[in-house]
Amino acid sequence: MILITGGTGYLGSHACIKFEEAGYKTLLLDNLSNSNKTIVKTINNILGHEVGFIEGDINDKLIIEALFRENSIDAVLHFAGLKSVSDSIISPHDYYVTNLVGSIRLLETMKQYNCRKLIFSSSATVYGHPAKLPITEDMPTNPLNPYGNSKLFVETYLQDLIKSDESWKIAILRYFNPVGAHESGVMGESPKNEPQNLFPIISEVAFGLRDKLLIYGSDYETKDGTGVRDYIHINDLVSGHLDAYNYLESFDGIEILNLGTGKGITVLEIVKKFEEITGQRISYELTSRRPGDVASCYNDPSKASKILNWNTKLGLQEMCIDQWKWQQYLGSK
């Protein structure tokens, strides 16, 4: 059985479906701080069978120990954590307690119950301002905020853990910008709090739920002055987790891998594509840059391609189509 922490969140829910469809049995753990339990029903409907779900926090030692004691858990996909860059600056304590301390407590329990296979959800934010583009895994890390620091601290802990016990099998996956939704159109990114990511905001503008999109920065040295990011379809991202899991079957040690398309896309290019897909005009306002934002950020995915035989299959067209289907579904409820 595979434990998926943060299992009802955006990444965890899609990973659950990918692994279950590949024949693996999963168990979801989530404290529901930024997701809804109804996603479990959605997952069950998509799969046609039920998956296990436990409501609980990775910092709750009693719940975590009971979970391992009562289930035969062979591996963990660790998505649980706080992920807002701006919130981390306001409340760094929460980010270190949840992302760092929670991860350490989870790993302690894994070791106690002889479960030593882990895929850790990290982030491209660990690179900070990239020294060059595209970003490769051997480039220096220099996070610009507590969120990025919390991810890097866990990475460092995992590398020290391997040095002390070589029987661990660990993949650290550094994501770039996950977007899109399940191809069914009934499951996607649906945080309890106000959306902060670009795709949900654009789709809400297209659907008439927002007046306009604020674009932060129009004077970057990019093709149209707006920021460039490496957007990856959620389905490609979770496929990378499945490939990493299968790779770890015959590998002892630790691997750090970027997961992205390797292609940079500007904000205005996304706006144009959304207008094309939806037939709706996307109103936007160009405003000043946000502190800490970089002009361009995209990766070199060749290491993941070589080691995992993994490559992205879905482009901006599919990202926008699936996001729009999900927004229409939300609007019909």
Image (cartoon, rainbow, N blue to C red):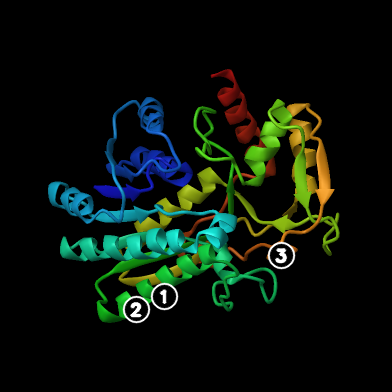
Image-based side of 243 in relation to 314, left or right: left
Q: Pinpoint residue 258: horizontal percent, then vertical percent.
A: 53, 63
Tell me the distance, in whole angstroms, between the alpha carbons under discs 2 and 3: 30 Å
Q: As shown in the figure, which amino acid type bears the numbered disc 3? A: Val
Residue situated in front as seen by the camera: 273 or 280: 280
Tell me the distance, in whole angstroms, between the alpha carbons under discs 1 and 2: 6 Å
Q: Pinpoint residue 167: horizontal percent, then vertical percent.
A: 24, 72
Q: As shown in the figure, which amino acid type bears the numbered disc 1? A: Thr
Image-based side of 271 in relation to 191, left or right: right
> Which dot, 2 or 3, sits closer to the camera?
3
- Residue at 65% of width from left, 56% of height from top? 230
- Residue at 35% of width from left, 44% of height from top? 31
Mark on residue 294? 3
**Is residue 259 visible in the rendered structure shown here?**
no
Q: Given the current orientation, which residue lies at the most extreme bottom position? A: 163
- Residue at 71% of width from left, 32% of height from top? 210
Which is more N-terminal, label 3 or label 2?
2
Tell me the distance, in whole angstroms, between the alpha carbons under discs 3 and 1: 24 Å
Secondary element under disc 3, as helix, strand or loop, is loop
- Residue at 38% of width from left, 47% of height from top? 6
In the rendered image, which residue does mark 2 sit on? Answer: 160
Which is more N-terminal, label 1 or label 3?
1
In the rendered image, which residue does mark 1 sit on? Answer: 156
Q: Pinpoint residue 116: horizontal percent, then vertical percent.
A: 25, 64
Q: Estimate how packed mark 2 is, as few (under 14), some (14 to 19) or many (20 or more) residues with alpha carbons within 10 Å.
A: few
Q: Relative to 210, say whether 106 is above or below.
A: below
Tag 1 and tag 2, C-beta contact below 8 Å = yes
